[in-house]
Image (tube, rainbow, N blue to C red):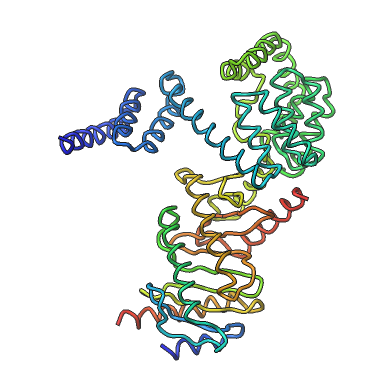
Amino acid sequence: MGFFKNLLSGREISRLEELIATSPAPSLFIRLAQLYREKDEEDKANEITRKGAKLFPESDILNDACHDLDKVKNEADKQRIRSRIEQYPSPMLYAKLAELCLSDDLAEAERVCNSGCRSYPDYGGLWTVMARIAQMRGNLSEAYAHLEKATELDKYNYNALFMLAEVAVQTGRKDSAKQALEKILFFAPDDIKAKKWLDNFDAKAAEIESALAAKSPAAKQGADMVESGKQRTAMLNAKEMGLMPEDKKGSGVGTSLHVEIREIRRVEGVSGTILLDPNGLVIASDLPDGMNEELTGALITNIFRIADDHAKNLTLGEFEDGIIDTETGRIHIIRVAQMIMAVFAGTETKAGLLQRAIHTFAERVMDQAG
Amino acid sequence: MKEILRSINKIPGVRGTLLIGQDGLLIDSDIEDSQDSGTMAAVASSVNSTLSHAIARMNAGGKMTRFVMNGSAGSIVLLSAGDAIFLTLVRKDANMGMVLVELKDAAAKLADMMDK
């Protein structure tokens, strides 16, 4: 009976996959995910659901399913980071935890941020999250003060500088907004967004001001809803009202790391980079599509630990870095401050050039970490 | 085989070479007496096996062909030589580019020998 059931389900999966390839529809994704779930292939089912939601953002069923998945993952991530903080506290972990809490518990995010800031007052990423909390509550002056502090502590914090420019306009500080955009162009001269904004500064400023004037009562409503526990709806409302930047994912905390990591891609042939804490948790990543961030993180950490443990047995002293060549690529694994970094590149990549880019990155990160 | 290992040892900065089976047992070596080649072979095999599995799971560009591991006191280079693992110990001050070029040829020759 089980055999026939599996056979039929396998056939239906193949048929659905063919249909999705030729004429995708939300119902096809939902059914396919259901079939994979019945086969106990939860990861595959989740992947299908996310793919469907990405392709059909207007589908309520797919979006709700995706939201549930995110919620479960979010909770698991939060729990993992909390236990890491207990064992190996670091400012980045506090900031990451606060950022995860932003989506469903603003008060908890603030509590985490406050306790992180008490222990690590010089970490800019935490002040960026504080600014986002203030911005979501509609307290723009407070957001501006936090962003000033964040960018003073971490001059490469790309998203904090953009946020600062936006909040500066909203609070009538147009000169500060211009200065923030000029700072972005100083370290990223090709940044199209900053260039465009600066070229049409007055028009963009007027747009931000009129959006704020038209939507401020609704923003207050959004903030009230967060407080009353309807956090997700409130965030969606605030987002629709243009009070939050469209892409919140990965912004704020560790954004300077994201920016720095992307810099490594400038080396010809580099396809991606991942930065991990010693326990394999992802701190920042810029991996190509199709590479599972968590799996890659876990495997890289495993390789690093094996190399680190055995370096002495192989008379190498302390492990510094490793370069793995495969048939079509190269992986460079290195310790950066207390983190593990892996860079994926093609075989055509100049090893010396890549090494220089990695060392520049390492120096910047170590500067930031003090 | 011994000749190939010896020729590699003549490259400035190379401290020794080992040829290891996939099971971690030593096939041949040309290394300073003070080194415990048996332990090194077992450790290198374990590192090689972990790496190969991880690379396969990550889907990061086919099979592993070479691993260069740098430490504070020197480096090792692990190369595939047919079914065997070819390990070379390199001093910190060596010209790694030159060593890698020579090792590539040597590994190809060793792989041929292993196949026969």
- Up the image or down, A149 lies above or below A57; here it is below
- Up the image or down, B114 lies above or below A12; here it is below
Residue B111: percent from left, percent from top: 37, 78
Q: What residue is at 82 percent from the left and 39 percent from the top?
A: A152
Residue A241: percent from left, percent from top: 63, 15
Report whether A293 appears left or right of A163. Answer: left
Q: What residue is at 63 percent from the left and 13 percent from the top?
A: A228
Q: What residue is at 76 percent from the left and 39 percent from the top?
A: A124
**Could one spot residue A57 in this view of the protein?**
yes
Q: Quadrant of the N terminus of chain A?
A: top left
- Up the image or down, A152 lies above or below A332; here it is above
Give the quarter of the image for residue A350: bottom right
Give the quarter of the image for residue A81: top right
Residue A197: percent from left, percent from top: 72, 29
Q: What residue is at 64 percent from the left and 68 percent from the top?
A: A318
Return the residue nearer the eye: A271 or A299. A299
Report whether A190 appears left or right of B84. Answer: right
Residue A113: percent from left, percent from top: 72, 32
Count of marks placed on residues: 0
Return the residue nearer the eye: A358 or A85. A85
**Could one spot residue A161 in this view of the protein?**
no
Report whether A6 appears left or right of A73. Answer: left
